Amino acid sequence: MTSAAPARVGVIGAGRMGGGIAQTFAQAGSRVTLVDNGEQAARQGLARITDSLQRAADRGLLSEAAETVAARITPAASLSDLPADTVLVVEAVFEDATLKAGILADVEKTVGPQTLLATNTSSLSVTELAAALDRPERFLGMHFFNPVPASALVELVTAPATARDTLERTLDFVHALGKKDVVVKDSPGFASSRLGVALGLEAIRMVEEGVAEPEAIDDAMTLGYKHPMGPLRLTDLVGLDVRLSIAEYLHATLGERFAPPRLLRDKVARGELGRKSGKGFYTWQ
Ligand code: NAD
């Protein structure tokens, strides 16, 4: 059986990730309601998606006209604009547990009983977010990667209450997007962030101890282990502040092995945040 994209999707948050998620579903044929804080923010989100679709079309990456895909996305100012027959809602607002829990509880009141709910959190506990819902069996983590249209993976995170059917239907949607899945039980950092941050922190400790220069450490992983990018260059791209906040969370939940190195704290305090600030472990133009 071939996988089919959900007919109607809701995406909450029209930022970097929500925009990419909305675009990806629209490219697979779903009708998407894109909700942000007010009409202007939602329209701006759609404008960014339209630009991204046009760039994809210019590079020959779309099978339809960019306008045809963009026309499937409707910007919306409020959660109450979500149609009741929405098949799947993906929440992608700021990484704030209280904000996310409140939004998920409000979504549950708006959509029908069959609608599946997902969070795109990169680190928060899916189990704790599930506690905000009356029907947590229809909820799971759907962790997309940036940039969403080009990335190959979606990490699905199940909480103890997630129903088997919820996981199976969501797996089908992931495959309809042309992406691969990994399924993990909810635990701090899931699989991707936990392993990625562990490698990144060890690389930073090696710089701190003077073991080698950043280029040499990255070359060891790219040339020796065939990683597409070294851990320090990746830390620069993600943002040192973002990495520090995930490391602090993993330190609090998983223990000393995730203690953020002094060098990481010092660089963040100096404003050396990686590519976005022009300097991290490398200098960026
Ligand atoms: P972002 O800041 O680009 O976008 C967040 C959007 O949420 C903004 O447009 C904001 O206006 C909107 N928003 C805030 N409160 C809202 C509300 N009450 N109702 C509707 N919209 C609201 O952030 P992002 O980078 O897209 O991250 C979003 C989520 O995805 C976070 O949970 C983040 O941890 C996760 N994530 C991010 C990445 C990444 O690389 N950026 C990767 C994986 C997961």
Image: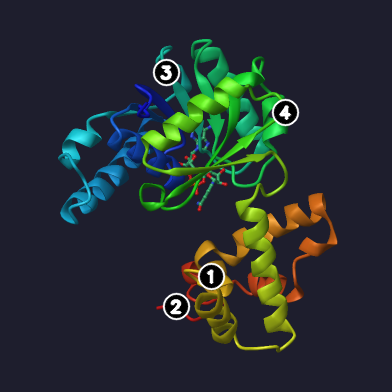
Q: CA distance from mark 1 to mark 3?
A: 38 Å
Q: Amino acid at mark 4?
A: Pro
Labels 2 & 1 near each other (Cβ < 8 A): yes
Please state which of the two labelled residues, at mark 4 or mark 2, is closer to the viewer: 4
For numbered disc 3, what is the local secondary structure?
A: loop
Q: CA distance from mark 2 to mark 1?
A: 9 Å
Residue closer to the observer: 51 or 184: 184
Q: CA distance from mark 4 to mark 2?
A: 43 Å
Rendered location of residue 67, percent (x, y):
17, 37
Residue under label 1, please give it.
236
Depth check, front residue: 42 or 280: 280
Q: Residue at x 72, y 77 (%)?
A: 205
Q: Amino acid at mark 1?
A: Asp
- Of labels 2 and 1, earlier in sequence is 1
- In primary-sequence order, the first of circles 1 and 3 is 3
Q: Nearer the viewer, mark 3 or mark 2?
A: 3
Look at label 2 and name its amino acid.
Trp
Single out the mark in the foreground, 1 or 4: 4
Q: Residue furthest right?
A: 256
Q: Is residue 93 above or below residue 238?
A: above
Q: What residue is disc 2 on? A: 284
Image quarter of residue 10: top left
Mark 4 nearby-residue class (10 Å; few <14, some 14–19, many ≥20)? few
Amino acid type of disc 3? Answer: Thr
The disc at residue 160 is 4
What whole-number distance in Å separates the C-alpha atoms at marks 4 and 3? 24 Å
Q: Quadrant of the N terminus?
A: top left
**x and y, in percent, of residue 103 in the image:** 57, 27
103 sits left or right of 198 in the view: left
